[in-house]
Amino acid sequence: MQGFDSKFKDFPDYIIGITNEIWESRGISKLHQYYSDDIVVRSPGSVVVGNQGVIAATMATLAEFPDRRLLGEDVIWSGTPEEGMLSSHRIYSTATHAHDGVYGAATGKKLKYRIIADCHAINNQINDEWLIRDQGAIVRQLAWDPKTYAAELIAREGGPEAAVRPLTPKTDKPGPYKGCGNDSPWGQKYAEIITRIMGADLAAVPAEYDRAVQTAYPGGETGLSHDAVDRFWMGLRAAFPDAELRIEHVIGNQGPMMPPRAAVRWSLWGKHSGWGAFGQPTNAEVYVLGISHAEFGPWGLRREFTLYDETAIWKQILLQTG
């Protein structure tokens, strides 16, 4: 890979390798090498600009969860080493809540949750990132519910006026990556499925998904078959029925020993005007950043992984409604 360290055999190896070096091998200082000084890292809860902020957040997380592991489930990617590459990296993380931190007083509880990170890399450095942790799964395992945790977080940050603002089109910062993925038919197919479902065409579920589809959704929720798919997407769209759907980035991959896969980053921006996954409508203006991964088989979409941050959505609602 031109411009990248020769110890990495390909781009997935680079992404999985540097994740291990930084987190599990405690090479936090390697963030100076692998992340650009002016990187933009967007998570649903905030926007961080600059490598120093990334390093501080990494150390804080490892202080709270010292045995954290990041197990790479898949890397779906696009681009070239010469022009830059975008990875959508799905991780299954395990950790023990061993010390006090952003999630409150240490509980000693062992956690399991997923993360999906979209990272742009060129010349051996990541310079643009979109990161979603399954905060709903984390806080539930620590005996919080997402709404209560969001309220507590606002209070600890100094109240509604001082609290860190979640990611929205108003708080986002531009980064160097301007691409939109690749033209793989698998990525396009998955983007079309999401667009149909968000357009209230729930008939897309039995038409496009394997009857034995396995699902993993926010809150650590896993499911089987069409009813799990219908319930998840219906609950989300019903909460924000008039919000604008934007398909932000689309990748499809086919590789040796792997099924056809797709990664789609999408967003909703609009009012919490309906009954659904977030309870009684509040008319708060809410931004939902989502990343979805899919694997296809002979009878349709056979595995689906979608993440958004429930706590960031509740934080937006509470900041506007009290």
Image (cartoon, rainbow, N blue to C red):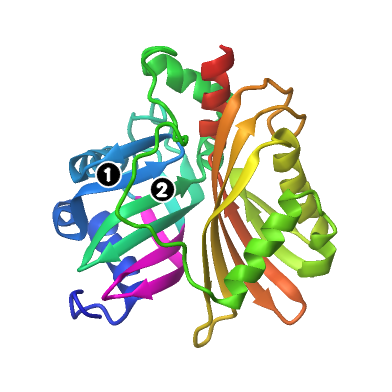
Q: Position of residue 255 (x, y in %)?
A: 50, 84
Secondary structure of residue under mark 2: strand
Q: Position of residue 58 (x, y in %)?
A: 27, 44
Q: Position of residue 55 (x, y in %)?
A: 21, 44
Q: Establish if 212 lies above or below 241.
A: below
* Tag 1 near tag 2, CB within 8 Å: no
Quadrant containing the C terminus is top right
Amino acid type at circle 1 is Thr
Q: What span is in magenta?
A: 68-91
Residue annotated with mark 1:
58
Identify the residue at horizontal 75%, vertical 54% (top origin). 197
Amino acid type at circle 2 is Ala
Identify the residue at horizontal 47%, vertical 46% (top origin). 133
Identify the residue at horizontal 38%, vertical 43% (top origin). 42
Q: Establish if 284 lies above or below 82.
A: above
Looking at the image, residue 90 sits to the left or right of residue 235; the answer is: left
Residue annotated with mark 2:
95
Secondary structure of residue under mark 1: helix
Q: Quadrant of residue 192?
A: bottom right
Q: Position of residue 123 (x, y in %)?
A: 20, 68
Furthest residue in direction bottom, as rendered: 256
